Image: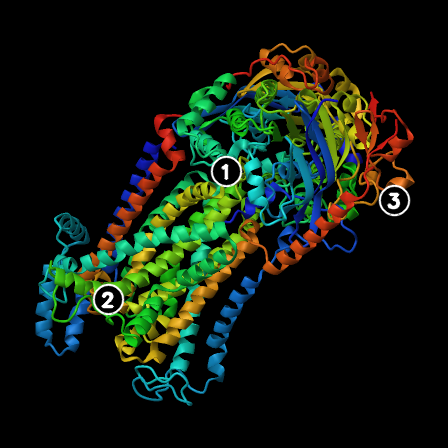
Amino acid sequence: MTEIVSAAVAADHSTPVLSAKDVTKTFKVAGGSITAVDNVSVDFHAGKVLAVVGESGSGKSTLARMLLRLMPVTSGTITYQGKDVTNLGGSELRRYWRDVQAVFQDPFASFNQFFSVGHMLKRSLRLAELDKGTEDQLIETCLGYVGLKSADAMHKYPHQLSGGQRQRVMIARALMMNPKVLLADEATSMLDASLRVSVLNVLQELRDNLHLTVLFITHDIGQACYLADEVVVMEHGLVVEHGTTDEVIFTPQHDYTKRLLADVPDLQGSLKTRSWEPGAPAHVPPPAKDS
Amino acid sequence: MGLRRYLASKTGWYLGALVVAVVLNFLLPRLIPGNPVDVIVSGLGQGGLSSEAQRQIYEQFMKEFGLDQPMWNQFVTYITSIFQGNLGKSFAFYPTPVTDLIAQSLPFTLVLQIPAILLGWIIGNVLGAVAAYKGGAWDKSVFTTSLVFNSMPYYCLSIILLYVLAVMLGWFPPGGAYSLGNSPEWSMAFFTDALQYWWLPFISLLLINIGGQAVGMRSMAIYELGSDYVNYSRSLGIGDAKMTTYIFRNAMLPQITGLALSIGTMVGGALITELVFSYPGMGTLLFNAIAANDYPVVQAVTLIITVAVLVANYMVEVLYGFIDPRIRASKSGEK
Amino acid sequence: MTKSLMRANNLTAVYAADSGQDVPAVDNVTLELPEGQILGLAGESGCGKTTLGTALAMIANPPLYVVAGTLEIDGNEINLSTLPKNANQVHRPYRGETVSLLPQGAMNAISPTLRIRDLVVDVMRAHNGSVTKADALDRASDRLKMLEMPTRVLDSYAHQLSGGMKQRMVTVISTLLNPALLIADEPTSALDVSSQKALIEMLLAMVEAKIMRGVIFITHDLPVLSMVTDRLAIMYAGKVVETGRTEDLVNNARHPYTAALLSSVLDPTEDTRTKHVLGIPGSPPNLGNPPSGCRFHPRCKFAMDVCSTTEPKMLSEGDHDFACWWAKEHPRETIPMEVTHA
Amino acid sequence: MTNISSNAVTAEAEGPLVPTDPTPGPKAKAKPAWMNLNFGPRLWVSLGIIVVIALLAFVGPLLYPYGPDEKVGSLYDAPSAAHWLGTENFGYDVVAVLMASTRNSLINGLLAGTLATVIGVGIGVVAGYIGGWLEELLMGITNIVLAIPSIVILILISMSLQSTDIPFFKGIVGLALVIGITSWPWTARAVRAQASSVSTREHIDVAKLSGARTPGILIRDVLPYLASYVVMAWVLQLASAILAESTLSMLGLGPSGTNSLGMQLHWALAFQSVATGAWWAFLPPTIVLTLISFGLLYLQSSLDEVFNPRLRRGKKKNLAAAAKRREEAARKLEEEMKAPAGVTEVIV
């Protein structure tokens, strides 16, 4: 693990590690086109967790896929450590993926069900180009980092792991590349609340201990609140608000952010504001019109 | 996808398929080394004809069929004569026009196949749906029987039926389409006579079509049984009979496209059924033409089969567009 | 306490596994709901909450079997078991009229080849053969008008509606016959927060208008439940471990599992910014072979020796029931939350 | 042919109804999910049929005293102790001819069916995974070929091949090639749909991020997910290739100078065996063809149930036993309920 730490610490804190500039994505559909991401510019600074919050259709996952270079941009540039990576291909792209890794939403679909955990991890290691001796060592370390024992996990198949364990294996896989940036695309949204917290905690530790840059994509503003240093709010492909987590969540400026925060039910808040008594008729606001 | 787009794209594909099919139909027999006339004439040679006479016949045929022309010219001639309804002259029954031969055979094929395909499709779907819904013994017997019929090659069932019902039991005449001495005409006497000969090949085709459709419908309906709407309708207290109609409607849609896909196979299978029963339709015509190396007839029969199958498929797909609300709804520009 | 609307007694439901073994997904559960209230049923995936809802809605289908249990509702006592041969005929008249289901993910709840209006007519006629088409549609459009929804949706097919609209339309259909009890199974989980809010407000308005006289709201989302419900029941591994008034449960959890679930809730609040939650170690148990004693004991921070040997009985503190040995030894003491602050 | 709409890919996404034990004991050996398949009795029945026929075709000739080209009698000699199924129209022993025919028909089916499956899967996977203009081109070709009845193309090609002088094309292998290259389209279309749904799975993205290249992804991440589907398609292709051969042979376009089930029927019909009641000439090939076709289709449908639990309807015996146990449990529960109340204990 020491080499991971030294590499991450050496990173420059003032200039962004990864940045998107004027990135746009349009999809052709029958009889027209849809702009999924509209002229978005975001910077990611080393050692920070940046959350991109938005509802379905906000373009947050499309943005993530473009940053990961899994999907071409329609226009705009993506820069990594000062280098334009928008149109990388072949071995250069694979080198980029050594530094920028990801964990996806579906803890089952992320796994090839025909491979054991060990097989999957060793396959990923080919990208890291290590010698055999250090491979097992690294797997052990990375699984340990997400709270799993290599002896237990290596021979298991995905269906023998719980959702939380699967996502942690996926994080371990990403860590093995010794990445500088980790994208978590709705990585916790399919997990139960108690397991979700354990994955969020792992991400937090990676930031604190390894100074990893984390891009956390979520629809749940509560999770962003728990984890993120900075928050970007997206709506219909546009960035509507960007600031520190405290700014965005506690003093939102944009109407959309305000509405989003107002609509989120919260445990204590809704108890307090509940205006009816059990069994008694209550005043109920008229249902909102369907948009 | 809007209905108009759907129809436009289907029309495009079928026109494309038609063009390809016509070109193949023209090209394939001409790709062989030498040409069909060689084959015919060398066949005559074995019959003891002098080489001089052979050469004369060869040249006459070459001219008659335009085979001395460059390929491109031949194609243009081929296309224009097709549009004029001229399919050339038979080698074997020279100079009978191919269209005459077809006019004699086609009606027999049509009266056999159209009822067998349509009726088989309807009965098969009903049986399949009932089997899926009832489950248990019903399902087991219907499914296994259907599977047997579905997996039996057409002509195998035909042969067995012919042997058992016609030869052994003598319930039906053992082949042909009408009694000796009778000839096709628009009279009641001819029809009642022909009907006796019609039953056996018809039943043989019908059983197999029922089997195929029932097997397909059963699996579609079982899929539908597990869907959310069945569960929800149940939770609303909707009765079993009503629910069966929902399932039937949804399972039906893929079965309609299934019909389009299987028409080609059915027609192919039916050709051989005619052979088994010596039924004087297109299949028997084709068989005889192949045996006699009668290329113009073979080409004409394959062309007609292709066009008929394409048209039938096209109509089924158009119908599908109108029936499936997911395609129809987008007509008016709704979401 | 107000008059009881429904009481489900000793409900047990099993899944027939491929191996031939039965896995009990709901194990001897008793549940009560007072008239006019909303009961939240919470727990994590696989805890049996959806199975319980399915059993109460009387639509259990193989491989799910309701082995035992009765439902007292509206003066009826219904045997919920699906084992008798005539169970389906017995249950059918109650479905939709006495107990109705609002299903998880309305996405495919309506047959794609059916107009909404056709389903409306079919539902009305299923319970009263003499209803005319016009009457059925009148009733549906009145209901839609009352809820301020456009009546043109009746002419649509399901795929023409947006996700939020579809979910609300299904809600209207489920409650068309004014069922005594509505079972809402994760109705909001697939929706954006704004649609989620709209649906919740609609449900509350319907309860207020006495369209239905009680709701069981099933979800894993505790903040949503705290917003909607009067009472909560927490399920773990096929058992109800704690029930009580929503305020009591949220502020004064008496079962360690409830406490851990509550601490895992991440609201966008100042508190969440600074807190550090540990979550629950381990995974939910295999229901085919549940742990002895209290099913939660392998993951519980407060587990004592007795927890692994003897199953705790339901205890009552006023209107608040729970099954926990620790709570028995510490009367009226809130379970300490496992949270540290930065 | 359209009913092999396997949803093997989507089924697992729904997840198990009951959580599986994430920490199995030391005895539980790790197995990938696909190995926990449930093979029903129908699968064994169909496999049995196919094995018996294969034995007849490949082992039978070694044990049977007569060869298929040994003239042992005259036209339609009736069955006797020496010749169990008599002789056919040329005076050859029917059993010997039948075994040779079955062997050739099976070889033809294997060659043609495998070829069609390979082409279909290749085109389908590439189109479904790569997408874009390549997909449109490949599927355009597929749809056109699919619309043209394949029997027509087969007739035209085999007729042309008949008149060549190259024996290879006239023989069983040539015929198999022709059948193979004309019958891939529906497999391609079905596989494309599956491949395109697999290619949206996140594990493909994970493989890319792990540095895997496109051929590796196709082989290791896409094909295994299609395996069950491909096996079923292959079984169907075998059946349809065997039938296509016999159809062509009946039309007089079969492999010249060799035996096949279709040729046997062709000659039986040509020499009036049905009308003359010589059942031993036409019935054996008819039955063998039916058995092959039934065995393969039954195999396909039982494989479909194995891979697709949604289609499965429980085994009667197990169901009955489980139901009995359940009723027992229900009775016990009822008794417990009748026991004195006091489940709830009031402590305050």
* Quadrant housing the N terminus of chain A: top right
Chain that bears disc 1: B
What residue is pinned by disc 3?
A: C309
How would you rate the neighbour count of disc 3 (Cα within 10 Å): few for under 14, some for 14-19, many for 20 or more?
A: few
Label 3 and label 1 in one chain = no
Residue depicted at x 37% and y 46%? B257
Amino acid type, callout 3: Thr
Residue depicted at x 59% and y 36%? A92
User: Does the image show residue A48?
Assistant: no
What residue is pinned by disc 1?
A: B238
How would you rate the neighbour count of disc 2 (Cα within 10 Å): few for under 14, some for 14-19, many for 20 or more?
A: many
Q: Position of residue C160 (x, y in %)?
A: 44, 28
User: Which disc is residue B287 wearing?
Assistant: 2
What is the tally of numbered marks visible in this picture?
Answer: 3
In this rendering, position of residue A89 left or right of residue A196: left
Relative vertical location of residue D212 with respect to residue D267 in this rendering, above or below: above
User: Does the image show residue C336?
Assistant: yes
Q: Position of residue C114 (x, y in %)?
A: 43, 34
Who comes first in sequence, dot 2 or dot 1? 1
